[in-house]
Image: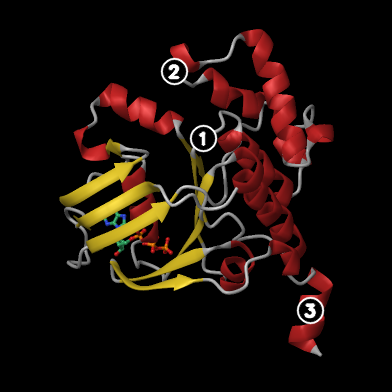
């Protein structure tokens, strides 16, 4: 599925300054941004530019001081507790260094996301197991369901995090540096899952990354944040995760 044109995320004049922050500048400064359904959208910028804050205002975790945030047709600032719970059902989140419960198997870690979803939306117990197994297959870890997180590589753990974020089939997937500690081969595995989440599950994907190769390989568009403001919006020319160099190719390119 490609971008349908209908907006799923709209920020209008959004500003945020953290109270008590050492840095007096706003974390977000008058941001206007529209992201369309079916897009894979990159958010880039130097450390402290406001990327994480941008993601957090989308899920209602951070409340802006000014402006309007609309996600999937909902005015996030006007939502009560219940509305926010419903909003978060539509949003999957993957953070860097994802935290899996070490005492639970991979399967149970993913199932937890279903068990924590609102009662009215929760699949029956009988339906949860096949949904979890299907999602583990989707991320290429169908054979790992009975393993514990400590038995997995970093890239596999990241894909478990993706399965956990995707198992409830969210309309919007937010990823904060999903490949930051991975080599290029493992990065390509994660990017393949993100591309398929858009193509096969219909999720819109917003990804924060420092890695411009990730943007080139995955994203349709990207925004460059600087000191909380959108400095540039790019349409990404080359967009195919399959063109990511292998780890060996990258080593040869850099060192030879
Ligand atoms: N909870 C907080 N309290 C106070 N200041 C904060 C808080 N979170 C972020 N900031 C500040 O807001 C600004 C933007 O931070 P943010 O984490 O959004 O940037 P970022 O682009 O995601 O950075 P990084 O790439 O290092 O994660 C920074 O100056 C940061 O110090």
Point out the frontmost of discs 2 and 3: 2
Q: Which residue is mark 2?
A: 118
Residue at 74% x, 69% y is 243
| Neighbourhood count class around disc 2 (C-alpha, 10 Å): few under 14, some 14–19, many 20 upward | some
Q: Is mark 3 within 8 Å of ligand 1?
A: no
| Neighbourhood count class around disc 1 (C-alpha, 10 Å): few under 14, some 14–19, many 20 upward | many
Of all residues, the one furthest to the front in this rendering is 5
Q: Would residue 70 be found to the left or right of residue 178 on screen?
A: left
Q: Earlier in the sequence, mark 1 or mark 3?
A: 1
Quarter of the displayed picture in which ligand 1 can be seen:
bottom left
Residue 94 x %, y %: 53, 45
Q: Would residue 91 be found to the left or right of residue 218 on screen?
A: left
| Neighbourhood count class around disc 3 (C-alpha, 10 Å): few under 14, some 14–19, many 20 upward | few
C-alpha gap between disc 1 and disc 3: 36 Å
C-alpha gap between disc 2 and disc 1: 14 Å
Residue at 64% x, 37% y is 163
Q: Which residue is mark 3?
A: 251
Q: Which mark is residue 170?
A: 1
Residue 187 x %, y %: 69, 60
Compared to 192, does 243 lie above or below? Answer: below
Whether residues under marks 2 and 3 lie with C-beta atoms below 8 angstroms apart, the answer is no
Residue at 17% x, 55% y is 20
Point out the frontmost of discs 2 and 1: 1
Q: Nearer the viewer, residue 25 or 81?
A: 81
C-alpha gap between disc 2 and disc 3: 47 Å
Number of marks in the rendered image: 3
Q: Secondary structure at mark 2?
A: loop
Residue at 22% x, 67% y is 23
Q: Would residue 35 be found to the left or right of residue 133 on screen?
A: left
Q: Nearer the viewer, residue 61 or 43?
A: 43
Q: Nearer the viewer, residue 211 or 134?
A: 134
């Amino acid at each position: 599925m490609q971008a349908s044109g209908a907006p799923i995320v709209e920020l209008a004049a959004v500003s945020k300054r953290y109270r008590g922050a050492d840095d007096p500048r706003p974390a977000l400064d008058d941001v206007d941004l529209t992201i369309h359904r079916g897009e894979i959208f990159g958010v880039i910028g130097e450390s402290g530019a406001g990327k994480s804050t941008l993601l957090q205002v989308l899920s209602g975790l951070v409340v802006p001081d000014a402006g309007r945030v609309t996600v999937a047709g909902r005015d996030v600032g006007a939502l009560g507790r219940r509305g926010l719970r419903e909003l978060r059902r539509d949003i999957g989140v993957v953070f860097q260094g994802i935290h899996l419960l070490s005492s639970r198997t991979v399967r149970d870690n993913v199932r937890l996301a279903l068990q924590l979803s609102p009662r009215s939306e929760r699949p029956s117990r009988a339906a949860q197991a096949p949904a979890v197994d299907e999602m583990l297959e989707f991320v290429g870890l169908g054979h790992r369901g009975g393993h514990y997180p400590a038995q997995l590589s970093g890239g596999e753990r990241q894909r478990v995090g993706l399965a956990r974020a995707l198992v409830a089939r969210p309309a919007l997937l937010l990823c904060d540096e999903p490949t930051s500690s991975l080599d290029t081969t493992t990065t390509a595995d994660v990017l393949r899952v993100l591309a398929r989440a858009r193509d096969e599950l219909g999720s819109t994907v917003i990804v924060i990354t420092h890695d411009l190769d990730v943007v080139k390989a995955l994203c349709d568009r990207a925004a460059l944040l600087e000191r909380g403001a959108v400095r540039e919006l790019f349409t990404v020319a080359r967009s195919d995760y399959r063109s990511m160099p292998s780890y060996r190719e990258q080593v040869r390119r850099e060192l030879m």
